[in-house]
Amino acid sequence: MTTQTRARVRVEQTQKRVRTQIGGVTIADSTKVLMVWEIPYFPTYYFPQSDVRMDLLADSGETKRSPSRGTAALHDISVGERMVEHAARVWTEAKIAEVSGYVSFDWASMDHWFEEDEEVIVHARDPFTRLDILQSSRSIRIELDGVTVAETDKARILFETGLPARYYIPKTDIRFELLTATDTVTSCPYKGHARYWSITVNGKVRDDLAWGYDTPLQESIDIAGYVSFYNEKLDIFIDGEQEERPETKF
């Protein structure tokens, strides 16, 4: 894997085979994909045109400009009777030589993404993000407005690059009479799809403070059936000492 940096944009080549589809038709399929960090948190896949079904792309006449990456021609993608506008970006005037002429795609416009034969959700996985899930015997107590919501010495702690440690609690150690399931669902490319619970204490309902993964992705299977709580919004005591609430985007 090689690394290049141009105008503060990280560019790396991945050895993975990457594919993306619309309507069951593979639009791009390559083992020569570049990962470009358009934003700091995760990369975007860039495909060489030779590995893209360019016959399904039509130039819309519009462009997308980036101060760091240059100008891309926006292309529509047509598959049968279906047309997806501005789904592809052909980097015709790239400021980064490595991506000149490459094609990137709007993630949400595509139906499916695959690394090798495994589907990827939400966004491309960052190879520099690591997850460690460790069994812990430390005493962990979760409080909201002075009321204990959960207490355990059997937590599984999830350490994820760039985020505070998350404490996943066995359901048997949670006061579920205080929790109410909501319709909220979020997705993570490393963990899968999470469902949420609100918490009611002292007559006040706090929405979506707890979440869990019933069937997480394989790399996060050890948190299946466990429940975690926002460190940012509840008081967490580790071996009797209160943790400082972290400041995050959550």
Image (cartoon, helix red, strand yellow):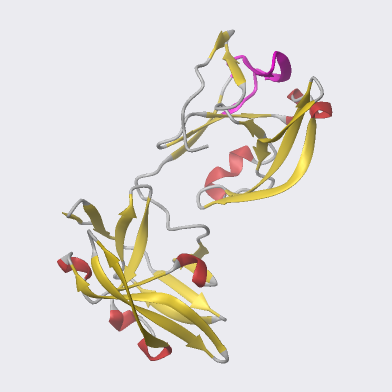
Q: Quadrant of residue 202?
A: top right
Q: Nearer the viewer, residue 219 or 148?
A: 148
Residue 144 is inside the magenta segment: yes
Relative to 200, is 58 above or below? below
Relative to 73, is 82 above or below? below
How far from the left and from the top, in percent, is residue 173?
74, 23
Q: Is residue 14 visible?
A: no
Please give the range of residues in magenta: 137-156
Which residue is outermost to the top? 240
Q: Quadrant of residue 89?
A: bottom left
Q: On the picture, is 19 further left or further right than 182?
A: left
**Secondary structure mostly taken by the magenta-highlighted segment of the chain:** strand
How far from the left and from the top, in percent, is residue 30?
35, 74
Q: Nearer the viewer, residue 54 or 182?
A: 182
Task: Name which residue lies at 38% across and 91% down.
Answer: 55
Q: Is residue 223 visible?
A: yes
Q: Quadrant of residue 208?
A: top right
Which residue is outermost to the front? 62
How far from the left and from the top, in percent, is residue 134?
53, 29
